[in-house]
Image (cartoon, rainbow, N blue to C red):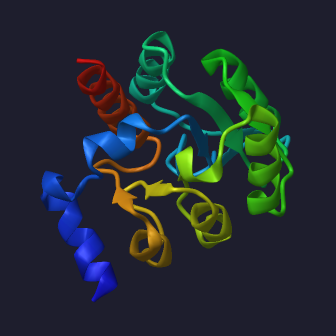
Amino acid sequence: LALAQRLAALADPAQAPEPSRLAAVAAVATDFDGVHTDDRVLVDEAGREAVLASRSDGLGLARLAEAGGPRLLILSKERNPVVSARAAKLRVEALQGVDDKAAALAAWLSAAGVPPERALYVGNDVNDLPAMALVGLSACPEDAQPEVVAAADWVLPRPGGRGALRAMAEALIAARRDAAR
């Protein structure tokens, strides 16, 4: 039943968090694979990896930063140069090779002076669940694993690596703009 309710939220924009809740977000942490990417990896004959990411997502995150948006962090289990390259291009801090995402996120939030209840975490797979449970607002792309969709406060209306972060960024920008009025 919980999964059906989360899936229904995809078709009903009223199921998105209240604008006041979005406007209160002071930090956003995201997984990389499956959130910034479509969760696939290309491996060439030399073992080099490449991923697909959305330029639209990148522009959304840039617009969020320009609007004075929340602090941003990429939190990844993987240790891969592609994560560093994408984070550098987006001008977003990245922590890689993280097995315990909840502990790493708690430490990052503490260092930033952001209470967990003012943080948003976006994940797509079961290893993101502890970090999602730590924060005041959790989200996932529409194509996240069923357990994650069921646990998320907010199911973003686009797939990972194909507009999910743009949708999140635009909603946060709109909520901040409306709160400033």
Q: Position of residue 135 (x, y in %)?
A: 58, 57
Furthest residue in direction top, as rendered:
66
Residue 102 quadrant? bottom right
Q: Position of residue 43 (x, y in %)?
A: 72, 46
Q: Nearer the viewer, residue 176 or 5?
A: 176
- The answer to whether one can see residue 163 in this image is no
Residue 26 quadrant? top right
Q: Nearer the viewer, residue 26 or 127?
A: 26
In the depicted structure, whether residue 145 falls above or below residue 176: below
Quadrant, the N terminus: bottom left
Q: Is residue 164 left or right of residue 77?
A: left
Q: Is residue 172 left or right of residue 89?
A: left
- The answer to whether one can see residue 2 in this image is yes
Q: Position of residue 41 (x, y in %)?
A: 64, 49
Query: In the image, what residue occupies the spot 63% across and 45% down?
Result: 32
Q: Position of residue 71 (x, y in %)?
A: 61, 28
Query: In the image, what residue occupies the spot 54% across and 37% down?
Result: 52
Q: Is residue 135 left or right of residue 54?
A: right
Quadrant, the C terminus: top left
Q: Nearer the viewer, residue 96 or 131?
A: 131
